Image (cartoon, rainbow, N blue to C red):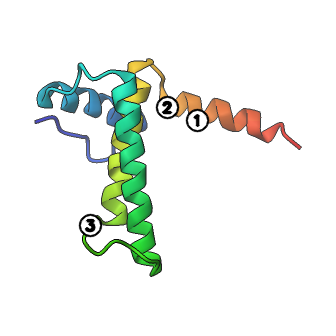
Amino acid sequence: MPTLKSQPTLADFQEYVTELEAERGFSEQTVKDKCLLLGEEVGELFNAVRKVEGLAIDHQSEIGEVNDELADVFIYLCAIANRYNVDLEKAFLAKEAKNKQRT
């Protein structure tokens, strides 16, 4: 099983997800697969938020915890970035530089 440093960087998380997918047999999933799975996880996150906020939920469904669902979303986000060789830290900083130019 892959391990993370005690204070991992965003690049460390992306590398961890690469290793995790290889170990679990998910490295052959396509970007389309990952996007659909990400969408499912976002839906689960929304349900967890609904539960915490006291909104109506399907009591027959198993609703996860917000922190768990956020972690799942993050894993899929890293997986998609990895498939396009996107360094998320650089992408974030570049996008924020663009955003700062907006008025």
Numbered label attached to residue 74: none
Looking at the rendered image, the disc whose residue lies closer to the viewer, 2 or 3, is 3
Residue 81 placement: quadrant:
top left
Quadrant in the picture for the N terminus = top left
Mark 1 vs mark 3, CA separation in Å: 35 Å
Q: Which residue is mark 1?
A: 92
Q: Earlier in the sequence, mark 1 or mark 3?
A: 3
Mark 1, Cα crowd under 10 Å, few <14 / some 14-19 / many 20+, is few
Residue 96 placement: quadrant:
top right
Residue type (three-letter) at the residue carrying disc 2: Leu
Q: Is residue 37 left or right of residue 54?
A: left
Query: Is label 1 in contact with label 2 (beta carbons under 8 Å)?
Result: yes
Q: Which residue is mark 2?
A: 88
**Regarding mark 1 in the picture, which secondary structure is present there?**
helix
- Depicted 14 relative to depicted 45: above or below: above
Query: Is label 1 in contact with label 3 (beta carbons under 8 Å)?
Result: no
Q: Which residue is mark 3?
A: 61
Residue type (three-letter) at the residue carrying disc 3: Ser
Looking at the rendered image, the disc whose residue lies closer to the viewer, 1 or 3, is 3
Q: Horizontal and vertical percent for residue 2?
A: 16, 34
Residue at 65 percent across and 29 percent down: it is 94
Residue at 44 percent across and 61 percent down: it is 46
Residue in the foreground of this view, choosing between 41 and 92: 41
**Regarding mark 3 in the picture, which secondary structure is present there?**
loop
Q: Is residue 74 left or right of residue 99?
A: left
Residue type (three-letter) at the residue carrying disc 1: Phe
Mark 2 vs mark 3, CA separation in Å: 33 Å
Mark 1 vs mark 2, CA separation in Å: 6 Å
Q: Horizontal and vertical percent for residue 95?
A: 66, 33
- Depicted 22 relative to depicted 57: above or below: above
**Regarding mark 2 in the picture, which secondary structure is present there?**
helix
Q: Horizontal and vertical percent for residue 59?
A: 29, 75
